[in-house]
Image (cartoon, rainbow, N blue to C red):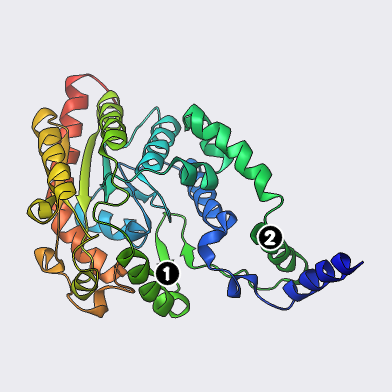
Amino acid sequence: MSVLIVFSIIVASNFFINPRGIYPPSIFPALVTNYRNKKANDFTNLKKSPDLVIIGSSRALSINPDYVEEQTGISTYNFAVTGTYLDEYLVIMRYVFDQSKLDPPKVILIDRPGFWVNPDSTADRAPLKFFPYIDEESRSKIFINRTVDLTNLHQFTEAIYSIQFLLFNREYQETWTIYNNGFGLPHIDESLGEAIEGSISDRLERKLCDNFFPDESMPILEEMVSLAKENASSIIFYTSPAQPDYVKALNERVYQNATEGEKSPCGQILSDFYRELVEKNSQVHAVFFSHPNDFGGYSDERGFYDGSHMTEINNNLLINALSPEIIQAYQESIQLRESQNLP
């Protein structure tokens, strides 16, 4: 009887209390899976396949495809999603090329291609549309994780929250508004303070080169390059910088990319790998920015809505700097397809 009373209180409370005020949004796979499902649907429903597709994490979500097309003349779709890792980049890339077989994108722009892999994350967050493009190990985890979710209190509160939305037309809280071209507009007022505090505290606890898996990552990156080659497409790997004060707060222990090889052993491994990848493959480009001033970006909070994520205006400046590389990669793909008598 007492168990039933406690259970009833939990159910009743969730009709009046936002469960996302109790738990952080990151523990709701349903939320991030919804973003992926929407983008998969929107991409499939495009009237014409875009010539450029952006694949990345939430750092790239606020890159506006309309601005990219304005600067380069190249039609663009933003397939960046929140909380993603390198192995899921490959899943999305497989999906993109499979859904646009008759006219595959000529350029793939890859954001923040570090050596981060997380099969559990891919299995947790992948919509069913991605299932055919996921490796066998992650497929089995999807069924296991979905079953476990049935007994998960977090998922239970999410279900109750969804019921409120459906039955009572209550506002369904999102941290991003995702448009049909893939552009994501963050809800800054809801997440700014917690995002800064959470990001810094989480990363300060990590060890040097934590979540750095070159042995697992290199084959994934090489397969991405092979996939681009098969479709006569060019691929651009790039990194965008973090806010300088944020980097300083992290004591330069976590923020590592190919331009910082001298500061960290993992940065050197990353730098050497991409250098070799570019030298061996004419269709591969790599552009790495370590500071906003590298591309004329803002060096204060105006260009970042937290220490790590850039605002749309700063991403516009980033695109300005990347535009010559994008146009060159696009032209190379056109020439390659003409030489192979491809459409």
What residue occupies the far right of the structure in this picture? 1
- Image coordinates of residue 323 in percent, x first then y, are 16, 53
How many labels, in total? 2
Q: In which quadrant will I find the N terminus?
A: bottom right
Q: In which quarter of the image is residue 293?
A: bottom left
When asked about the image quadrant of residue 214, the answer is top left
- Residue at image point 58% right, 70% down: 173
Residue labelled with disc 1:
186
In-front residue for pair 146/40: 146
Labels 2, 1: front one: 2
What percent of the width, then of the height, locates residue 205? 33, 64
In the picture provided, is 202 more to the left or to the right than 27? left
Query: Where residue 26 appears, x then y in whole percent?
Result: 50, 61
Q: In this view, does 133 lie above or below 37?
A: above
Q: Estimate how packed mark 1 is, as few (under 14), some (14 to 19) or many (20 or more) residues with alpha carbons within 10 Å.
A: many
Residue for badge 2: 153
Question: 326 or 121: nearer the eye?
Answer: 121
Please identify the quadrant where the C terminus is shown.
top left
User: x, y percentage for residue 73?
Assistant: 23, 50
* Side (left or right) of 23 relative to 116: right
* Mark 2 or mark 1, earlier in chain: 2
Q: In which quarter of the image is residue 170?
A: bottom right
**Could you tell me if the residues under marks 2 and 1 are in contact, i.e. CB atoms within 8 Å?**
no
Q: How far apart are marks 2 and 1 (CA)?
A: 27 Å
Secondary structure state at the residue bearing disc 1: strand
